[in-house]
Image (cartoon, helix red, strand yellow):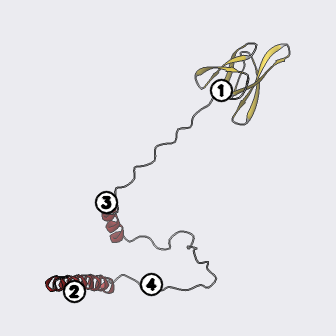
């Protein structure tokens, strides 16, 4: 490397070192002169696990001037854009499953399962938002959630 390049690199390194030193001095002076700051004492607890963090709420509220500075940092997007809020969860309402068709007191009835509960309903009967409209040989027509569903008895792997 030519001698002039070495000299330029040395000057750049010294300038960078002086700049970093000035920034450290400025930050330390800022914290040393703040009148309302308290000394932070670190304690060592030998019984504390290596990767554990203290649990519970912070003991001090965020000071007003600190919260303003935090707001400036967040809105400046220096750490990247804020992620969008998560979309609202939509709970999909699935119609009940038809388990079987049986007679109850001489009337055809449908055995339906909805969210872990089993319901036994005859034609024109309504229970927990499920209304049986019609029962056929291997199917039941029900009204659930404001829509009409035609359910059939399971007849094989992945049958609908």
SS class, disc 2: helix
Sequence order check: which comes first, mark 3 or mark 1? 3
Q: Quadrant of residue 5 in the image?
A: bottom left
Sequence order check: which comes first, mark 3 or mark 4? 4
Sequence order check: which comes first, mark 2 or mark 4? 2
- Foreground disc of the pair 2, 1: 2
Q: Are marks 3 and 4 in contact (CB under 8 Å)?
A: no
Which residue is denoted by mark 4 in the rendering? 40
SS class, disc 3: loop
Of residue 102 and residue 107, the one placed in the foreground of this image is 102
Answer left or right for 76 relative to 86.
Answer: left
Which residue is denoted by mark 1 in the rendering? 129
Q: Position of residue 45 (x, y in %)?
A: 59, 84
As measured in the structure, the alpha-carbon distance from the residue carrying label 2 to the one carrying label 3 is 32 Å
Label 3: how many residues lie within 10 Å, few (<14), some (14-19) or many (20+)? few
Which residue is denoted by mark 2 in the rendering? 14
Label 1: how many residues lie within 10 Å, few (<14), some (14-19) or many (20+)? few
Q: Is residue 47 above or below residue 51?
A: below
Of residue 149 and residue 106, the one placed in the foreground of this image is 149
Which residue is denoted by mark 3 in the rendering? 77
Q: Are marks 3 and 1 in contact (CB under 8 Å)?
A: no
Circle on res. 76: none
Q: Position of residue 114 (x, y in %)?
A: 69, 32
Q: Are marks 2 and 4 in contact (CB under 8 Å)?
A: no
- Foreground disc of the pair 3, 1: 3
- Foreground disc of the pair 2, 4: 2
Q: Quadrant of residue 123 in the image?
A: top right
Which residue is drawn at the image coordinates 46% and 44% (left, top)? 87
């Amino acid at each position: 490397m030519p001698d002039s390049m070495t000299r330029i690199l040395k000057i750049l390194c010294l300038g960078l070192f002086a700049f970093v030193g000035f920034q450290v001095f400025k930050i330390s002076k800022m914290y040393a002169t703040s009148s309302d700051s308290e000394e932070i004492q670190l304690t060592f607890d030998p019984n504390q696990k290596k990767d554990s963090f203290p649990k519970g709420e912070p003991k001090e509220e965020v000071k007003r001037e600190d919260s303003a500075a935090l707001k400036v940092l967040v809105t400046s997007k220096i750490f990247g854009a804020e992620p969008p809020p998560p979309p609202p969860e939509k709970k999909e309402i699935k119609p009940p499953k038809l388990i079987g068709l049986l007679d109850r007191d001489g009337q055809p009835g449908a055995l339906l399962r909805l969210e872990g509960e089993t319901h036994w309903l005859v034609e024109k009967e309504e229970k927990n938002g499920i209304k049986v409209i019609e029962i056929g040989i291997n199917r039941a027509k029900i009204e659930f959630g404001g829509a009409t569903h035609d359910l059939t008895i399971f007849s094989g792997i992945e049958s609908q």
